[in-house]
Amino acid sequence: MKIAILPGDGIGPEVIDEACKVLKALALGVETETAPVGGAAYEASGVPLPEPTLALARAADAVLFGAVGDPRYDSLARALRPEQAILGLRRELGLFANLRPVHLYPELASASSLKPEIVAGLDLLIVRELTGDIYFGAPRGRRHAPDGAFAGALEGFDTMRYSEPEIERIAHVAFRAAEKRAGRVTSVDKANVLETSQLWRETVTRMASHYPRVALDHMYVDNAAMQLVRAPKSFDVIVTGNLFGDILSDEAAMLTGSIGMLPSASLDSHGKGLYEPSHGSAPDIAGKDLANPLATILSLAMLLRYSLDQEAVALKIEAAVQKVLASGLRTADIHAPGYQRIGCRAMGDAVVAAL
Ligand code: IPM
Ligand code: MG
């Protein structure tokens, strides 16, 4: 088995280092190979997703990804920006199913910005479609507006689109996940306004008949954003499109107190996947040993579970993280009075020691 390691930018390399420490300590005999991606790759070779990096990702059984992005590259043409690396990997590897579990560790209930009684025991899963929607829809671009009140003016445009098979395959992922959980799927759309969403809703509704043990309901995205902060425990699995899922998953992440705790998996239809922390590159704290490596370490656990079929090892890592939290160690993002504040490297060491 081979894992491609793509550290990327900002805090990416630091958090990846800690996850690699954990992988090494497990002594699974898994091979790893590292390659540059994002701004780091742009610096080295002029493009954010160099061909050898993509080739390595294709050849590996799974990809462990840090983060990409840095304000230094904000003025580059869109095709050269670091974000294009992750979007390109998702598209080229067909990673259409993004799983973002939102789990509140009981030890961190006080780190949430919501009242503990609203979030205690929170455990939901966001299933975000990742290779379609307005992110990838053509046509897109700039032109002079052909009509309307601002005809002739410069306008930017993007296209939101979803085909039936695309909706069906992500719905399958959500229903199957719900069968193993509390058996509820909430499909989030904007069917009161958008054609794309109307097709989405009809298609998901039709799929539900294949899953008699799962209860399906539908929610408009604005209401879902509200319910996530009003009664987050009312959700089990949320399935939604790429753009809505991007926004709702950041919102849901904050319910747990820190986005620094949340792993994610992006899977193709054969179980191959790219695993990355849900947080970004956080350039403001990069290189200061301040980042929380737990989201990346938990992403490694997801990698072992979904792509390497090592459920027992995944559970072991998750238990070690829980143990470290219970012992009172905290990185800055989840620190509160009464706990011991430590850096990124010490947190990685603590997880290895707990293992
Ligand atoms: C995410 C990120 C990406 C996205 C960016 C970096 C392109 O926000 O993974 O949620 O919008 O999908
Ligand atoms: Mg996002």
Image: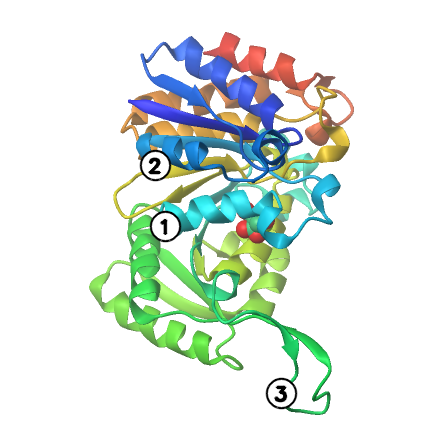
Q: Residue at x 54, y 34 (%)?
A: 37
Q: Residue at x 70, y 19 (%)?
A: 289
Task: Indicate which label's residue lies in the foreground, 2 or 1.
Answer: 2
Q: Residue at x 59, y 22 (%)?
A: 325
Element assignment for label 3: loop
In whole angstroms, how far apart are the C-alphas of marks 3 and 2? Answer: 42 Å
Q: Position of residue 52 (x, y in %)?
A: 42, 32
Task: Check mark 2 vs ligand 1: CB closer than 8 Å? yes or no.
Answer: no
Residue position for label 1: 182
Residue position for label 3: 146
Type of amino acid at the residue the image marks with label 2: Arg
Quick one: label 3 or label 2, which is nearer the N terminus? 2
Q: Which mark is residue 58?
A: 2
Task: Indicate which label's residue lies in the foreground, 3 or 1.
Answer: 3
Label 2 close to label 1 by CB (< 8 Å): no
Q: Is residue 109 visible?
A: yes
In whole angstroms, how far apart are the C-alphas of marks 3 and 1? Answer: 50 Å
Q: How many marks?
A: 3
Q: Position of residue 88 (x, y in %)?
A: 47, 47
Type of amino acid at the residue the image marks with label 1: Ala
Q: Is residue 99 visible?
A: no
Quadrant containing the N terminus in the rendered view: top left
Element assignment for label 2: helix
Q: Position of residue 86 (x, y in %)?
A: 51, 44
Q: Position of residue 75 (x, y in %)?
A: 73, 49
Quick one: label 2 or label 1, which is nearer the N terminus? 2
Q: Residue at x 76, y 20 (%)?
A: 338
Task: Indicate which label's residue lies in the foreground, 3 or 2.
Answer: 3
Q: Which mark is residue 159?
A: none
